[in-house]
Image (cartoon, rainbow, N blue to C red):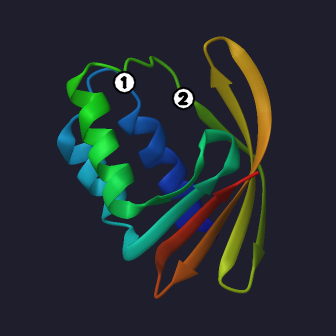
Amino acid sequence: MKKKAVLINELQNKMLMKGSTVEDIDKLFSHYTDDFIYIHEVYGGTYTREHLYNNSIKYLKEGEYQMTGARYKIISIIAGYKAVSLERQQTYQGVISNHLTVFEFEDNQVSRIIEY
């Protein structure tokens, strides 16, 4: 699960980079279950896989993904039963902050991501 969480982090970074493609988004979402949800209270609550995928495609087509360096850097990882928590350092618009992110797994795919 640790390796999978690191891979998801890398794929999330790649999706946000200048020159990313729909294939990059598809590759990321291929690691999510069909009923995947993303929970982030600061960003408005709970998002379904479909909603998040559609927004990702929309933002890509609007040219929003223009990063030239990784947005998320993993600081530490703790693995538990069917879950991995990551302390991630995020750089966004020049501001650096650390966040706790929990990846929950079901059959080797991510079923839920919770951001704290």
Q: Which residue lies at the image location 61% right of the left edge and 36% below the top edge?
A: 72
Image position, residue 84 (x, y; %): 70, 69
Which disc number belongs to residue 4? none
- Near mark 2 (Cα within 10 A), the count class, few <14, some 14-19 or many ≥20, is some
Number of dots carrying numbers? 2
Mark 2 = which residue? 70
| 81 on left or right of 110 | right
Q: Are marks 2 and 1 in contact (CB under 8 Å)?
A: no
Measured Cα–Cα span from mark 2 to mark 1: 12 Å
Q: Is residue 17 above or below residue 82?
A: above
Q: Is residue 82 above or below residue 2?
A: below
| 76 on left or right of 2 | right
The residue type indicated by label 2 comes to: Ala
Q: Which residue lies at the image location 25% right of the left edge and 34% below the top edge?
A: 58
The residue type indicated by label 1 comes to: Tyr
Residue 39: quarter of image? bottom right
Which disc number belongs to residue 65? 1
Residue 96: quarter of image? top right
Q: Which residue lies at the image location 75% right of the left edge and 73% below the top edge?
A: 79
| 10 on left or right of 82 | left
- Near mark 1 (Cα within 10 A), the count class, few <14, some 14-19 or many ≥20, is some
Q: Nearer the viewer, residue 110 or 44?
A: 44
> Quick one: quadrant of the N terminus?
bottom right
Q: Residue furthest front?
A: 44
Q: Is residue 83 above or below residue 62?
A: below
